[in-house]
Amino acid sequence: MGPWKDRARLLGVMAHPVRLAILEILSKQPRCVKHINALVPLAQSHLSQHLAALRKANLVASLACGALRCYYVLRPTLVKELIQLLRQEHPPQEHDCNSILRAAKAEKRTEVEGL
């Protein structure tokens, strides 16, 4: 369960609409807080809390540029691919009982033959 625990933790941190919006913005380019705040209109304190959670999870990092604090994505491949995946439609696919049973039986035969 080791790597799944870390991945579940990352997903848990990202599983908020504001944080996903922040990650989408930062996946395109680094941004300073005031620019992020213009695109994600929240009270500054709330935005800071979301950025802190993303920082703590090592999803984003920041640099002080004079009086400005600018953020960037630390895991660009993960964030870009996740955002792209979430933008797509994923309709549920219902199955009937017979197709599920056939698939389960086929899997069981494959396991037995593999031994």
Image: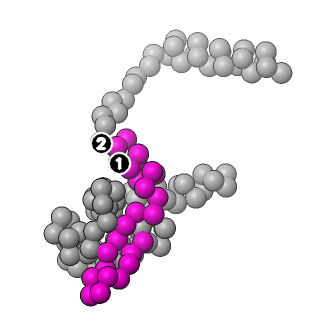
- Residue 17 seen in this snapshot: no
User: Marks 2 and 1, how far apart in space?
Assistant: 6 Å
Residue that mark 2 sits on: 87
Q: Which class describes the residues within 10 Å of circle 2: few (<14), some (14-19), or many (20+)? A: few
- The answer to whether 40 appears left or right of 1 in the picture is left
Among the 4 quarters of the image, the one containing residue 65: bottom left
Q: Which residues are magenta?
A: 61-86
User: Measuring 30% from the left and 56% from the top, which residue is drawn there?
Assistant: 28
**Quarter placement of the C terminus:** top right
Secondary structure of the residue carrying numbered label 1 = helix
Q: Can residue 98 be seen in the rendering of this structure?
A: yes
Query: For the point 20% across and 75% down, which residue is it?
Result: 34
Q: Are marks 2 and 1 in contact (CB under 8 Å)?
A: yes
Provide residue 96's location: percent of width, then percent of height. 45, 16
**Residue corresponding to mark 1:** 83
Image mark for residue 50? none
* Residue at figure coordinates x 74%, y 21% from the top left: 111
Q: Position of residue 66 (x, y in %)?
A: 29, 87
**50 left or right of 61?**
left
Of all residues, the one furthest to the right in this rendering is 115
How far from the left and from the top, in percent, is residue 45? 26, 81
